[in-house]
Amino acid sequence: MEQVPAVRGPSETVVTVAANAVLVMLGLLVGVLGGFQHSWYVRPVPVSAIGCVALLFAVTYGAGRATRGKAAPLAFAAGWALVTVIWTSGRPEGDLVIANDLSGYLYLYGGLVAIVMGVMLSPSATVAGAWLLTPHGYGSEQQSPPVPQAPPDPRTPPAQQGPSGPQVPPGPAAP
């Protein structure tokens, strides 16, 4: 009989690096599009800046929930921040992509708050050392809950009670 070789999938490290690279590219794309499209107004309300802030939070929080860690939302945030810093720096001609008006401030500072909130609300990784949001102590060992003990019998004098309840001395059985 012919033996079929086992098909090996990609390692977890390769998939993680690829996902983070895609998220950095998505952050760069959102930074470019948001930088040029954040200043659309409907009357006095900068609706596109509000939409960009909501999109930044949704992608950051979604990446954290999907990967169950904080590295993916930070990768997206790094891409967005890189482009946004470039857009806020002035040129010798005086041109800016993100201007100092209501929509620019809302996009810049609201985007920073949205990304920080998305990263902070994402769950921590489930590896050893993820101590921030774990329900147990600071150690990496799992502690077992205390074993409930039986309450002492109120009819037995305190001198004959032990740690696990009343202690009856050995002797002849009562008639």
Image: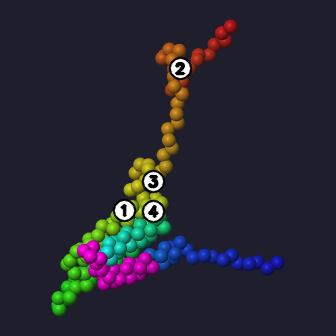
Residue drawn at (36%, 62%) of the image: 120
- The residue at which mark 1 appears reads as 120
Residue 71 in sight from this viewpoint: no
Mark 3 or 4, nearer chain start:
4
Residue type at the position of mark 3: Ser
Choose top left, top right, bottom left or bottom right for residue 64. bottom left
x, y percent for residue 101 = 20, 77
Residue annotated with mark 4: 125
Taking depth in this image into account, of 108 and 143 the one nearest to the observer is: 108
Marked residue nearer the N-terminal end (1 or 3): 1
Q: Residue type at mark 1? A: Met
- Label 2 CA crowd tier, 10 Å (few <14, some 14–19, many 20+): few
Tag 3–tag 4 contact (CB < 8 Å): no
The residue that label 3 is drawn on is 140
Quadrant location of the C terminus? top right
Front of the two marks 1 and 3: 1
Provide the secondary structure element on which disc 1 rests: helix
Residue appearing at x 28%, y 78% in the figure: 41
- Highlighted magenta segment, given as a residue range: 21-45
What residue is at 30 percent from the left and 80 percent from the top?
A: 40
Amino acid at pointer 2 = Asp
Q: Which element is circle 4 on?
A: loop
Which residue occupies the extreme bottom position in the image? 93
Q: To which residue does mark 2 refer? A: 153
Give percent across and percent down for residue 125.
45, 62
Sooner in the amino-acid sequence: mark 2 or mark 1: 1
Residue 43 position within the rendered picture, expressed as x and y whole percent measured from the top left: 26, 76
